[in-house]
Amino acid sequence: MKNYTSMDHFWMPFTANRAFKAAPRIIERAEGIWLYADDGRKILDATGGLWCVNAGHGRQKIADAIAQQAMKLDYSSPFNLGHDIGFEFAERLVKYTPDNLNRVFFTNSGSEAVESALKIALAYQNARGKKGKYRFIGREKAYHGVNFGGISVGGLTPNRKGFGPLLPADHLPHTLDLQRNAFSKGLPEQGIEKADELANLLQFHDPDSIAAVIVEPISGAGGVVLPPIGYLKKLRELCTKHDVLLIFDEVITGWGRLGASFASNRFEVEPDMITSAKGITNGTVPLGAVFVRDEICDTVINAAPEGAIEFFHGYTYSAHPIACAAGLATMDIYDEEGLLERAGGEIGAYWQESLHSLQGEPGIVDVRNYGLIGAVQFAAPDGSLVGPKIMQRCYEKGMSVRAVGDIIAFSPPLIIEKEHIDQIVETLSAIAREMFA
C-alpha cells in the first residue's frame, strides 16, 4: 500500500527520473519467478531482479535465516573483532571456487568487490617489490561497477565521462562481432584473435607497468557479450607469461548463471581473483566478495611487520552477520535443488533453442546465449533507439526485461520452467511483429 505522497525525494539510480515518475512502474511484492505490480498485474521477472535473484523470490529458508540471525547477532565490527558466521561463510564459499582461490575478502556489493580486487592487486605488487606495476587493463563494453576504480577499468562511456581523471587504465577491444557471429548458439566460434590485443597493449605500456587485467567472462550490462571459444584461455596464458594478474568479474556469471558455480569452473580457466556479489545472497541482503589466490593473500600479509595491519582497506559492513546468514541459506538452496548446475542441463538447452527460434522475426539482428543468460538485439530501419520502447512494451505485456541500448538482456531465475521461457519468446515475437512488421 502506498504510504508516501510524493516521489520527489527518491533520486533513483540509473533511471530516467522524470520519465519514470511520469509513468511509474511500482512493484509491491514478489514470489518465485513473479513480480506483482501495484495494479495487481503479474509480471514475469525475466532478469532475476538485477541479475541477482537466482533462486527466485520469497524463499522462506533465507527469510528465516535472516530473522534468526538478526535476533542472535545483528551486527559486530569486522575490525579487530570476529564472529563465527563470517568464518563459517568464508569456509563454505571456497568449496565452490577454483582450487587455488581459498581466501575471501568480504564487501557489500559488486562495485566494492571490484574496488577491493584492484587494491589487492596493487598491494600484492607492492608487497613483492613490484611498485612499478600500477596500471590496469579492462575491456570495452565492460561494466565493473560505479566506484572510481570500476569506471576506470570499465568500458561503458556514459559511466566514465564527466568523472575524470581516473585510474591509469587501458582497454581491450570488445568481442561482439555481429558480422561473423550473429545468431551463434553458445560461445561464438570466431574472434579468438582479439585476445592477441592484450599482447599488444602489454608491449605498448611495458608488462612491468601492468598490475592486473580485469574482464567479465561474459559481459552483462554491456549487452551480454560472449567470449569466443578459446579467448579466455588465451588471456590467461598471456597474463601468466608476462607476470600480470588476471581478475574475473563474476558478479553476474557466478552462482549458477552458466551452469556451474563460476564461469571460471565452467570454462576451465583459473584467474588470480574472482569478484562476486548479487546471487551470493540471492539478492536479499547486500554482500560482495573477492576470492583471492592463496599466494596473493599470503604475500600481502607476510610483507607487513608482525602485529601490524597488513591491508588498509575494508568496510563497516564487511561480512555483516545478517548478510552471511542469508548467504549460507542461499548456498543450502543451491545445493539442495541443484541450481548451480541446472543451466547446463535440459532447461539451458530449451532456453537456447527457444531464444534462437526468434531468428527471422522482424527487427531482430542477433540472438546470443549461454547457460541461462541471453540477449536479443534489435535494429530499427531508421536507426532510432528502440530498446527502451521494447522494454516498456514488455512490461505492459507482463514481463520485466532490461534494455541495454537496442539489446534486450535476460537472466531469469534459475528456477525457470519451460512455460515461462515460452512466455518470454512469445512476448518478444509479438512485440517484434507489432513494431517492425
Image (cartoon, rainbow, N blue to C red):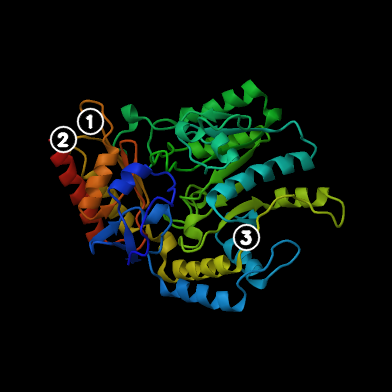
- Nearer to us in this view, 402 or 94: 402
Residue corresponding to mark 2? 436
Rendered residue at 19%/50% (across/down): 427
Q: Residue furthest right?
A: 306
Label 3, secondary structure: give it: loop
Label 1 to label 2: alpha-carbon separation:
7 Å
Which label was assigned to residue 380? 1
Q: Earlier in the sequence, mark 3 or mark 1?
A: 3
Q: Determine the image quadrant of residue 81.
A: bottom right
Vertical comparison of 268 with 26: above or below: above
Q: Secondary structure at mark 1?
A: loop
Q: Of marks 1 and 2, which one's residue comes earlier in the chain?
A: 1
Specify whether residue 291 is in view. yes
Residue 317, which numbered label?
3
Q: Quadrant of the C terminus?
A: top left
Q: Quadrant of the N terminus?
A: bottom left
Which residue is at the far top? 204
| Residue type for callout 2 | Phe
Residue 384 in percent (x, y) is at: 26, 29
